């Protein structure tokens, strides 16, 4: 059941993941106001100091926030676990021509995995983060709900977190809008009140993505063809492209073609072939996909055996879409959408919802 933050955390030790950003800093304030014994834990997950990752600056900001709020700060290095459990997966997926989302794995394996274990060693009764989401315990099982701010809701990235971890987690920002959080940071005099939100993955930072990936995976150029087989150019390596991609294809204006944009509509891994087409080509769309590595929050939802009606999204910023989910075998499901979906990219996640409750998700294996 859902309870107020004060009733949930008062007089309990809460270990807060403090990144050095505005969101987790305001989460600390809210926990203090609710009467929690707050301890901050800052993670270092990436150690390469090449000018792109802001880890060192973020640690300094976290220290300053803790000094202002008078809460203890603990610092732990999880870079080895991150490389083994997240980054290795990231590279393997790109090597196979898929498009991974390491943030989902980072939440499951690091923030609500090894981080949670470390928090218990600090005497933590509960774990907290600055995510825009809500948790609850229903019939003794942890549950996940969307955050109140629909534009910032992060339940998509949290769908693979285990129910037992959610049962021990509070999300202080779950009922707030982002503008309220910013205002609270200003009103509290936090030095980082106007700090820009972090975007992307820390280990990539603001650097060009291809530049980063090429240091780990060698480029493998190959032909770029239309669905009809016409060679239209050369790609720099299938790992650099994702289904539905429009930018960075290097296809300029052609006298024999219209001015419609070009999109990636397919990959042939065995032939190292990138398929591109102009406009809203039919290969971009599908009302069906197959997904693997299915992870439900708690037990599988009722009705799955006979075909589950729910809503789903295949990317973070997408609106929920009506669909039906059917079991194919032990680790595969079929998702049929009421309306065709654009660019269901293998390696990305399909995440399922019943109203505002997140049911879980799976890895997109193939479309159509």
Image: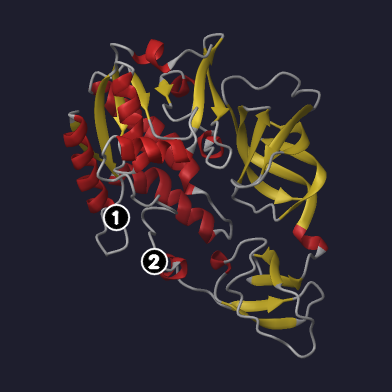
- Give percent across and percent down for residue 103: 47, 45
Q: Secondary structure at mark 2?
A: loop
- Give percent across and percent down for residue 199: 43, 53
- Give percent across and percent down for residue 210: 46, 69
Q: Secondary structure at mark 1?
A: loop
Q: Residue at x 46, y 49 (%)?
A: 89
Q: Residue at x 54, y 31 (%)?
A: 147
Q: Nearer the viewer, residue 305 or 146?
A: 146
- Give percent across and percent down for residue 253: 69, 86
Q: Residue at x 49, y 54 (%)?
A: 92
| Residue 211 in sight from this viewpoint | yes
Q: Is residue 244 left or right of residue 138?
A: right
Residue furthest to the bottom in view is: 255
Q: Is residue 208 left or right of residue 297?
A: left
Q: Nearer the viewer, residue 346 or 278?
A: 278
Q: Is residue 274 left or right of residue 44?
A: right
- Residue where numbered disc 1 is placed: 54
Query: How many other residues sit within 10 Å of disc 2, few (<14), some (14-19) or many (≥20)?
Result: few
Query: How many other residues sit within 10 Å of disc 1, few (<14), some (14-19) or many (≥20)?
Result: some
Dot label at residue 321 = none
Q: Nearer the viewer, residue 164 or 198?
A: 198
Dot label at residue 207 = 2
Q: Residue at x 59, y 50 (%)?
A: 347
First in sequence: mark 2 vs mark 1: 1
Q: Is residue 128 above or below residue 336?
A: above
Mark 2–mark 1 Cα distance, whole angstroms, equals 12 Å
Mark 2–mark 1 CB contact (< 8 Å): no
């Amino acid at each position: 059941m859902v309870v107020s933050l004060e009733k949930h955390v008062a007089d309990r030790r809460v270990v807060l993941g403090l990144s050095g950003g505005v969101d987790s800093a305001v989460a600390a304030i809210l926990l203090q106001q609710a009467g929690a014994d707050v301890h901050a834990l800052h993670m270092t997950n990436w150690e390469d100091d090449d000018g792109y990752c802001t880890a060192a600056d973020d640690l300094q900001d976290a220290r300053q926030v803790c000094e202002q709020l008078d809460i203890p700060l603990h610092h732990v290095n999880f870079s080895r676990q991150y490389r083994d459990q997240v980054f290795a997966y990231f590279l393997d997926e790109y090597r196979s021509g898929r498009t991974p989302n390491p943030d989902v794995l980072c939440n499951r394996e690091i923030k609500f995995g090894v981080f949670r274990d470390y928090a218990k060693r600090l005497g933590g009764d509960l774990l907290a983060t600055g995510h825009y989401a809500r948790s609850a315990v229903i019939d003794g099982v942890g549950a996940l709900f969307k955050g109140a701010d629909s534009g910032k809701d992060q339940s998509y990235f949290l769908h693979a977190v285990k129910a037992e971890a959610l049962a021990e987690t509070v999300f202080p920002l779950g009922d707030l809008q982002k503008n309220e959080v910013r205002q609270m940071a200003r009103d509290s005099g936090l030095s980082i009140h106007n700090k820009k939100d972090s975007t992307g993955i820390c280990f990539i930072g603001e650097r060009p993505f291809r530049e980063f990936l090429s240091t780990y995976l060698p480029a493998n150029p190959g032909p770029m063809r239309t669905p009809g087989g016409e060679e239209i150019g050369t790609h720099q390596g299938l790992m650099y492209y994702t289904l539905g991609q429009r930018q960075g294809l290097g296809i300029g204006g052609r006298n024999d073609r219209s001015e419609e944009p070009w999109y990636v509509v397919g990959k042939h891994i065995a032939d190292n072939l990138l398929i591109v087409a102009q406009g809203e080509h039919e290969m971009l769309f599908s009302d069906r996909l197959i997904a693997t590595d299915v992870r439900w929050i708690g037990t599988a939802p009722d009705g799955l055996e006979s075909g589950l009606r729910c809503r789903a999204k295949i990317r973070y910023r997408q609106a929920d879409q009506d669909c039906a989910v059917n079991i194919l075998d032990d680790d595969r499901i079929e998702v049929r959408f009421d309306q065709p979906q654009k660019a269901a990219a293998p390696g990305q996640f399909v995440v399922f919802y019943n109203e505002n409750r997140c049911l879980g998700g799976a890895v997109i294996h193939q479309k159509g």
